[in-house]
Amino acid sequence: AQSVSQHNHHVILSEAASLELGCNYSYGGTVNLFWYVQYPGQHLQLLLKYFSGDPLVKGIKGFEAEFIKSKFSFNLRKPSVQWSDTAEYFCAVNARSGAGSYQLTFGKGTKLSVIP
Amino acid sequence: DVKVTQSSRYLVKRTGEKVFLECVQDMDHENMFWYRQDPGLGLRLIYFSYDVKMKEKGDIPEGYSVSREKKERFSLILESASTNQTSMYLCASIPAGTGSSYEQYFGPGTRLTVT
């Protein structure tokens, strides 16, 4: 079964600092990768996804992520964070389950706090 | 506009009660999912359904059951609620046949407290 590991539980940054959130997954086959964001009190929403093609994926609000297949990684980056980026970020992997259907597996999440 | 709704935002139940959490999607999606979200544990899949009356266990099905009598509705049932089931419950849906690249659409969540 696939698993997802997010390196940091809580990251605290000042505004304008650069952000990188680590995500590693374990699955030997073809995967699709996602970053979701959950702002305080709001739904989970998709930030970006990797399906195929260019391993550098751009998402909403200036976020991007790079898929490095050899490292089983899909790290999230943003060059300059804003206070409004304060949220919890979840990395997720979609791969075939044992039953043959697709199953989305989430990491434990990284809470980002941006200090004005 | 895509919409997944959950019957309650907040619910307080007593230990031993039977609890029903309802989820409805208006997008004609075949696949529906129930997760629980706990601090430091992320989202964990409880059950999912890929068609009416079909269900599969996720990673933590113990203590839960589900019902999918209509395509748009997926219910999570706690037969006898326990305090360790206090959590945020999230429902999600996705169409069939789109491959694994499709994003899941999430409902707003139900925060269940079992006392």
Image (cartoon, coloured by chain):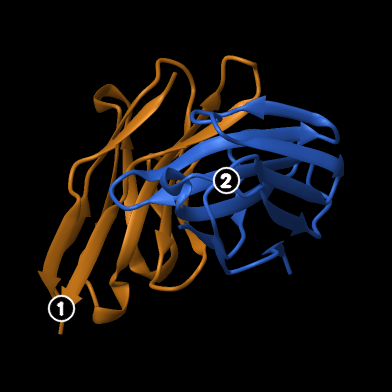
Q: Residue at x 27, y 22 (%)?
A: A70
The local secondary structure at tag 1 comes to: loop
Residue toward you, B108 or B7 = B7
Kind of residue indicated by mark 1:
Glu
User: How far is the residue under mark 1 from the one under mark 2?
Assistant: 47 Å
Whether residue B49 can be seen here: yes
Which residue appears farthest toward the bottom when viewing the image? A116
Q: Residue at x 73, y 47 (%)?
A: B75
Specify whether A34 is left or right of A111. right
Kind of residue indicated by mark 2:
Gly
Chain B's colour is blue
Specify whether A56 is left or right of B55. left
Quadrant in which the N terminus of chain A is drawn = top left
Position in image of residue A9 (x %, y %): 20, 50
Q: Quadrant of residue A67?
A: top left
| Colour orange maps to chain | A
Which residue appears farthest toward the right when viewing the image? B70
Q: Which label number is shown at residue B16?
A: 2
Q: Residue at x 32, y 53 (%)?
A: B39
Considering only vertical position in the picture, is A106 above or below B58?
below
Quadrant in which the C terminus of chain A is drawn = bottom left
How many residues crowd around disc 1 within 10 Å: few (fewer than 14), some, or many (20 or more)?
Answer: some
Position in image of residue B62 (x %, y %): 54, 29
Label 1 is found on which chain of the structure?
A
Position in image of residue A81 (x %, y %): 22, 72
Q: Which label number is shown at residue A15?
A: 1
Q: Quadrant of residue A41?
A: bottom left
The local secondary structure at tag 2 comes to: loop
